[in-house]
Image (cartoon, rainbow, N blue to C red):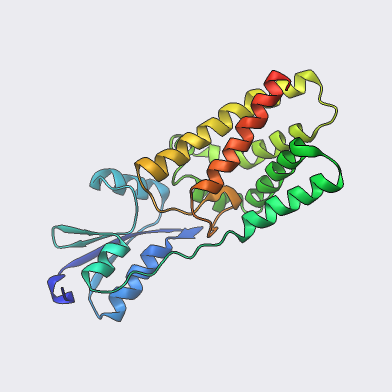
Amino acid sequence: MTSTTLQAIRLYRMDLPDHSCPWGLRAVRLLRERHIPFEDHRLTSAEEVEAFKLSHGVTTTPQIFSGSERVGGYSDLATRLGVRPEAAEISYAPVVAVFLTAGLMALVLAAGLGGFMGFAICLLAMLKLMDVEAFAASFRKYDLISQRWRPWGRLYPGIELLVGLGVLLQPEPAAVAQLVGIVAVPLGAMGMVSVGKAVFIDQLALNCACVGGNSKTPLGVVSFAENLIMTAMGLVMLTGG
């Protein structure tokens, strides 16, 4: 199928001040390389993005339309033009660095499994705190709470850091352990629900915000493991195990 089958092309893509959609940029480049004229509609606020998704019944951007027909996203456009879609850039380097560092710290300090988990939670929080706005923008794509209450994405890294510090606090006063457990269990459980919905139900191909904004780590096992660790530590502290 050639480009002549595509007419009156309209491209809708996210272009926020702190984040431009890489797939939208790929779609722009592909259309320009094929010399296909198109209207470039940039969604420049989170409200615009959500309103667009709701009005068209889609869960991701970019979206390409040919006249009244919705072609789909970048991969759909590439397939339609007979081009092999570019693969997403992925990297697990930040995740390996976090867990390896946490493991070595726990080993040197003889902190055991609890120390390892506490260090890992703190390090993950640190990566998020390096650019809170970028994290919040990435997190909002799949987190069910921040999609309904935007400030949650900015608060989350700080709360995660406090949970990690609470896990590391030795000896743990009973009141502190209970408080950390009360916070950590729902925090981790809700995170697992959000990731599960995005990956298995909505089948979204997103990057994980667990190691900060603009990461190249795919959403899935890593983020699920982060939330599982938090839930597990919360239950241990609640039960005094």
Left or right relative to 187: residue 8: left
Q: Residue at x 20, y 67 (%)?
A: 9
Percent position of residue 191, x then y: 52, 36
Quadrant for the N terminus, please: bottom left
Whether 81 is drawn above or below 225: the answer is below
Front-most of residues 51 and 77: 77
Residue in front for this viewpoint, 46 or 7? 7
> Which corner quadrant of the image does residue 223 belong to?
top right
**Left or right placement of residue 84 versus residue 100 in this view:** left
Q: Can residue 17 be seen in this view?
A: no
Q: In this view, does 186 lie above or below 34?
A: above
Identify whether 209 is placed above or below 201: below
| Residue 1 left/right relative to 31 | left
Q: In which quarter of the image is the C terminus?
A: top right
Q: Disc count in the image?
A: 0
Q: Where is residue 163 in the image (x, y as percent from the top left)?
A: 69, 34
Instruction: Between residue 167 and residue 127, name the one nearer to us.
Output: 167
> For the point 54% across and 37% down, which residue is it?
152
On the image, which quarter does residue 67 sit in? bottom left
Splitting the image into 4 quarters, where does residue 15 fall? bottom left
Identify which residue is drawn at 41% across, 43% down: 198
Residue 32, how many percent across, how many down? 30, 78
Picture residue at 54% right of the left edge, 38% below the top: 151
Q: Is residue 216 visible?
A: yes
Name the side, left or right, on which 87 lies relative to 74: right
Query: x and y percent of residue 209 in the render?
Result: 54, 50
